[in-house]
Amino acid sequence: MKAYLHTRRWPLAYGALLALLTLLPYAVAWQAQGEAWRFSGFLIGVEDGNSYIAKMLLGANGLWLFRPPYTTWQVAPLPVFLPYIWLGKLAAGAALHLQLAMLYHLARALAVALGALATYDFVALFVEAETDRRWVTVLATAGGGLGVWAVLTGAKTGWGGALCCYSPEAFGFLAEIFLLHVTLAHGIMLWLLRALWLENLSCRGGMAGLALLALFQPLSLGVFLAVWGVMFGWRTVLRRRIYIGGMVWPAAAVLVAGFYALLPVLHPYAHVWAQQNIVTPISVWHYIWAYAWLWPLAVWGGVAVWHRGQRETAWVAVWALFFPAFAYLPITNARRLVDGGWLALLIAAAWGLRALPPRWARGLKYAVGGLALVPFEVMLAMLTRTALQPRPPVFLPREEAAAFQALTAQAASGDGVLAAYATGNALPAWAPVRVIAGLGPESPHVETQKTALRQFFEPATTDAWRLDFLRANRLRWVFWGPDERQLGAWSPDEAAFLCARYREGAYTFYEVCP
């Protein structure tokens, strides 16, 4: 281990620097919240971010398995989102939301550093020169595609926007800035693929790796299988024999993935969740526009390693050229399967640069690196700007956060709360309660529930209907703030079956009276 760390000083140092850079905008946001605002903990993807904190709060309140906070259905515990639930057990006492948000980002920073190390380890198998390894590692973890240039210049290409700024699986840095589980799963997958390529994956290491991959991101099992298929197929064709040992771990991955695939069949809530958790495919032109500038170099690199006799390694070039096709496989959320393709493209491009005359290669290398790093720099600047301008949903009004905390003091864990969708998304991240609508995939029949919420606050709705709705959905509390007032003009103060338990400024919550 000491020797390994000695030879990995550069990726360790680089990973620490990258992790620090991804933390800086969040540190700015916490400093900017002042007296009037409270930081949600997320600068992008706030709706999903709130759900991660809500899952951590489950753990902080004693749960070991997942109980969905975005529905009041009576749901049997599920073995999903376990890393978030278990991470939440490290928090306790006062300022719980602040603790959970900071724990999340510290864990994410650790995942970023480990991901940089895993990337370097994988690259080192296929790229000989140290300078080239570093170039690939930096761009794989902090680089983006051409799409952002169309956005910055206002060009009307019609080929798609900045893929690197809305598809975390297509490049690296978006997941590093925001998604702990995706970042860590990416690193684990690279270490597994590295061990498979070296044909030295031990039983203990393989089982641990697949278990961690399934825990953090079950969809990464699909990426692992897709990439293994390219690697194994290429190696089998060249060797003209099947390496039986190389089939053990993909078979194990299929079994683990099968467990998660069966959940929607065996569990009613998981069935509805799977129906609503759909990631729509992106037009192929988005991928062409984002990656086309490096494909010629990748082709040249693949030809170069073939002619040098390194034919087995040329499978990386095959992966680099065809990975966008994974996004159109006939399976749910196939878009996630392009994860890692950007790294393969950079490895093949590094081969292509090495095959060019040194004078051309040097200038092209700097040009590619300079262009690829701009999206990351733009993203950090945009996030910092967002952090300095407190407004919803990135920031919550202080009065709203205070109302959430007051509800925490009065409600029992798991109590149902009626609230507007926007309130319902944030509330379970601050209080251990459940709502009927707050997160698209995890709130069953969410559009129906949104319609019911509007009907609840319509003045023409009868009190009998409201009371029946509260009882049918196991709702003990009614939250009333600015978002709820926008749903209708009816005031809960008019209802004899609601007792006000908190009133401060624009925020009130009521208990359904016995």
Image (cartoon, grey):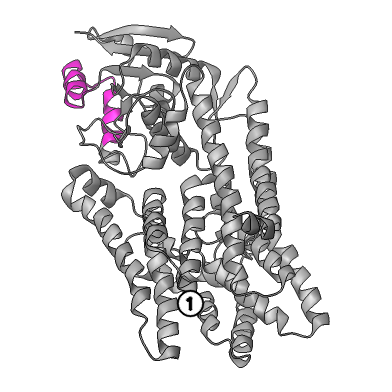
Q: Badge 1: few (under 14), some or many (20 or more) residues near its Cα, within 10 Å?
A: few
* Label 1 sits on residue: 322
Horizontal side, residue 353 vs residue 305: left or right: right
Question: Looking at the rendering, which quadrant does residue 418 occupy?
Answer: top left
Give coordinates of residue 47: x percent, y percent.
45, 38
Question: Looking at the rendering, which quadrant does residue 11 occupy?
Answer: bottom right
Rendered residue at 24%/46% (across/down):
270
Horizontal side, residue 319 vs residue 261: left or right: right
Depicted 76 relative to depicted 18: above or below: above
Give coordinates of residue 209: x percent, y percent.
41, 57
Depicted 266 relative to depicted 88: above or below: below
Q: Which residues are magenta?
A: 449-474
In the image shown, does 313 or 456 lie closer to the viewer?
313
In the image shown, does 417 or 60 lie closer to the viewer?
60
Give coordinates of residue 5: x percent, y percent.
64, 55
Q: Is residue 394 visible?
A: no
Q: Quadrant of the N terminus?
A: bottom right
Rendered residue at 57%/52% (across/down):
114
Q: Is residue 305 visible?
A: yes
Rendered residue at 29%/29% (across/down):
453
In the image shown, does 92 or 438 lie closer to the viewer?
92
Residue 467 colored in magenta in the image:
yes
Q: Quadrant of the C terminus?
A: top left
Residue 355 colored in magenta in the image:
no
Q: Residue furthest front?
A: 2
Give coordinates of residue 237: x percent, y percent.
41, 89
Depicted 114 relative to depicted 358: above or below: above
Question: Looking at the rendering, which quadrant does residue 335 occupy?
Answer: bottom left
Q: Residue furthest right?
A: 359
- Secondary structure mainly formed by the magenta segment: helix
Name which residue type carries label 1: Phe
**SS for callout 1:** helix
